[in-house]
Amino acid sequence: MKAQPKASHFIDGEYVEDTTGSVIESLYPATGEVIARLHAATPAIVEKAIAAAKRAQPEWAAMSPTARGRVLKRAAEIMRERNRELSELETLDTGKPIQETIVADPTSGADSFEFFGGVIAAGMNGQYIPLGGDFAYTKRVPLGVCVGIGAWNYPQQIACWKGAPALAAGNAMVFKPSENTPLGALKIAEILIEAGLPKGLYNVIQGDRTTGPLLVNHPDVAKVSLTGSVPTGRKVASAAAGQLKHVTMELGGKSPLIVFDDADIDSAIGGAMLGNFYSTGQVCSNGTRVFVQRKVKDQFLSRLKERTEKITIGEPMDEATQMGPLISFDQRQKVLSYIDKGKAEGATVLTGGGIPNDVTGEGYYIQPTVFADVTDEMTIAREEIFGPVMCVLDFDDEDEVIARANATEFGLSAGVFTADLSRGHRVVDQLEAGTLWINTYNLCPVEIPFGGSKQSGFGRENSLAALEHYSELKTVYVGMGKVEAPY
Ligand code: NAD
């Protein structure tokens, strides 16, 4: 098998197997071929991982921030040195084209280790609070054992985006990747050990929706950070609330991308295509409701159609391929059923709308699809599809489009294209979302906070803000005089 790891889990610095766990087959989405066979964690494996994390964490937390940071920065260097190998693994794991993974996946994971390794010494200082004669001070302290649960669209990035701030802040992590993409996180765990991370601090266990709750409900777990869908988020958040655990929820979206008639249309089309077709549309922050002001609608649609039909779909390992398959057969069925609903509810298929004829084999390929004449109440305009399906909606004026853009339970992201900078700022100010862009879309460098509002979640990844979500404040009041008691 092409990508069989040494064992299913990585615990306490080494690969661990327990063949009594149910089998997880890792399929290459471009062919459906089994590339690795792993086992889901049994309760004993879950216990082992959490016990290792619990044991290792206090000593790590006691190290100087600079010493912790040095390990993370070394991990970033190793990831960059092995970018090709890690990108190929990510392509096998996800079916995303190597053209993408080589620039966007391990590299953004490495950025995360580099950033948090660098900022940790300066980023977690407390406050001195004078109180007349007395005073107080605060310090940020780690939470303890943190659990990370990942989705399948950016497996290595998610493993790093959760691991880097957690470790930087002095925590230990047990990470469970998606059952669809079990491979990348194991490599991250290996690299961290090679970079000098003490054993037990970053553990990876495999499993599915039945394994997740074993982690979330474990009494020794202080925090859960989930990247996944809104329904899963509701389950995980309510389980965590039962034990008052900290949570970060990075969930789904149906984000608006608004194109005003004064915008640079080619840039707006480029932004809309990147924000709908990158990673075969499997990106949570995608701007899947593209509102185009009526005056430029025809121009927008004709150039969009032309550019979309030139996208090269094919074997992901081929450097020329721009779009690979979806993650799984089931995901393709789900996306196809949304496309059917769009047709049935009266939207116009501008291009795409099915399975491409020119790719052969068992891969889960689908055409990049654009629907025009979409209206707000259509299912394809309301629900997250998580595939390369762009919905184009028309609008006339600013107040109308803001109200329509906000008329959703989601609030992950939003974007505006306009040449009028005051309008750009005025509009984003009124859009209900956690991460917004003006005249670009979907850029998420590690320096900026990323996360959602409304049903798209809470907490933030990346930036200094993430450190706050992996630590808590401790306040110390220092009495400098005698204690005066009335009794
Ligand atoms: P999913 O919700 O099906 O699964 C996510 C993870 O949760 C998987 O590892 C799964 O095994 C685990 N899980 C499922 N049920 C669980 C439970 N009850 N308890 C604990 N863990 C459980 O999501 P998916 O299909 O893997 O990913 C696609 C979704 O993720 C989309 O909705 C997408 O928008 C979202 N996503 C969000 C972000 C973000 O940062 N906001 C990023 C990527 C993906």
Image: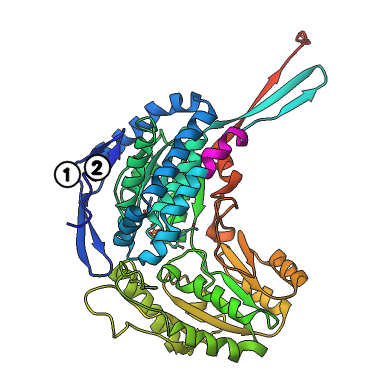
Under mark 1, the amino acid is Thr
Dot 2 alpha-carbon crowd within 10 angstroms: few under 14, some 14 to 19, many 20 or more: some
Counting from the top left corner in percent of width and height, residue 347 is at 49, 88
Instruction: Name the colour scheme.
Output: rainbow
Q: Write the start and end of the magenta stretch as one range.
A: 115-124
Counting from the top left corner in percent of width and height, residue 311 is at 41, 79
| Dots 1, 2 in contact, CB < 8 A | yes
Residue 246 lies, with reference to residue 379, above or below; the image says: above
Question: Number of numbered discs present?
Answer: 2
* Image-based side of 111 in relation to 427, left or right: left
Which residue matches tag 1?
Answer: 20
Q: Secondary structure at mark 1?
A: loop
Residue 177 lies, with reference to residue 440, above or below; the image says: above
Counting from the top left corner in percent of width and height, residue 149 is at 40, 49
The answer to which quarter of the image holds residue 469 is: top right
Of the image marks 1 and 2, the number of the one nearer the N terminus: 1
Between 107 and 421, the one lying in front of the other is 107
* Image-based side of 292 in relation to 127, left or right: left
**Alpha carbon distance from label 1 to label 2:** 7 Å
Dot 1 alpha-carbon crowd within 10 angstroms: few under 14, some 14 to 19, many 20 or more: few
Which quadrant of the rendered structure holds the C terminus?
top right
Q: Which mark is residue 42?
A: 2
Residue drawn at x 45%, y 77% is 389
